[in-house]
């Protein structure tokens, strides 16, 4: 599984990246987590907000950072 956090490099984007890495480690997921700061990648997806969380190329979260449990649920949903 490939997970990406896309953002401009702001504090919220970095926070989402750190939380996502924690979740992958805690849940022992076989996943890589990348942080992409190339805004053109977000625009290519047709998204105009950040941060963006993608799982296997599919945006699952856009524009805000929910609590850790919600992020876990979003990732788990994509595993099924």
Image (cartoon, rainbow, N blue to C red):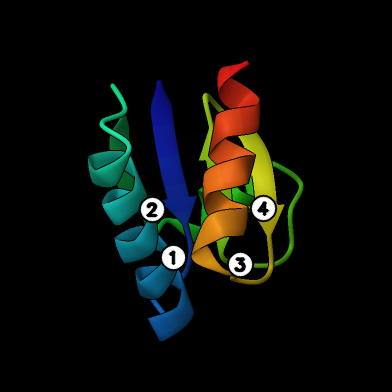
Q: Position of residue 45 (x, y in %)?
A: 68, 41
Q: Residue at x 59, y 70 (%)?
A: 65
Distance between mark 4 and mark 1 Cα atoms: 10 Å
Residue tagged 4: 61
Tell me if residue 40 comes above or below residue 30 in the rendering. Answer: below
Label 3, secondary structure: give it. loop
Q: Residue at x 42, y 56 (%)?
A: 38
The reply, left or right, for residue 4 in relation to residue 44 is left
CA distance for labels 4 and 2: 12 Å
Cα distance between the residues tagged 4 and 3: 9 Å
Q: Of callouts 4 and 1, which one flags the residue occurring earlier in the amino acid sequence?
A: 1
Please give the label number shown on residue 79. none
Label 2 vs 3, first from the N-terminus: 2
Q: Nearer the viewer, mark 1 or mark 3?
A: 1
Which residue is disc 3 drawn over?
50
Secondary structure category for the residue under label 4: strand
Q: Residue at x 63, y 42 (%)?
A: 74
Q: Earlier in the sequence, mark 1 or mark 3?
A: 1
Q: How many marks?
A: 4
Give the residue pinned by disc 2: 20
Judge depth for marks 4 and 3 and give the one in front. 4
Q: Tell me how far mark 2 sits from mark 1, CA to CA.
A: 6 Å
Specify whether 64 is left or right of 29: right
In the rendered view, tell whether residue 18 sits above or below residue 29. below
Where does the image place residue 61, in percent across and percent down from the top left? 67, 52
Q: Secondary structure at mark 2?
A: helix
* Residue at mark 1: 16
Q: Are marks 4 and 1 in contact (CB under 8 Å)?
A: yes
Circle 1 residues within 10 Å: few <14, some 14–19, many ≥20: many
């Amino acid at each position: 599984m490939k997970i990406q956090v896309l953002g401009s490099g702001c504090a919220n984007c970095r926070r989402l990246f750190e939380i996502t890495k924690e979740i992958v480690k805690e849940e022992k997921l076989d996943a890589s987590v990348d942080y992409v700061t190339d805004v053109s990648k977000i625009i290519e997806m047709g998204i105009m907000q950040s941060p963006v969380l993608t799982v296997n190329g599919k945006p699952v979260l856009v524009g805000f950072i929910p609590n850790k449990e919600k992020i876990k649920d979003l990732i788990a949903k994509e595993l099924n």
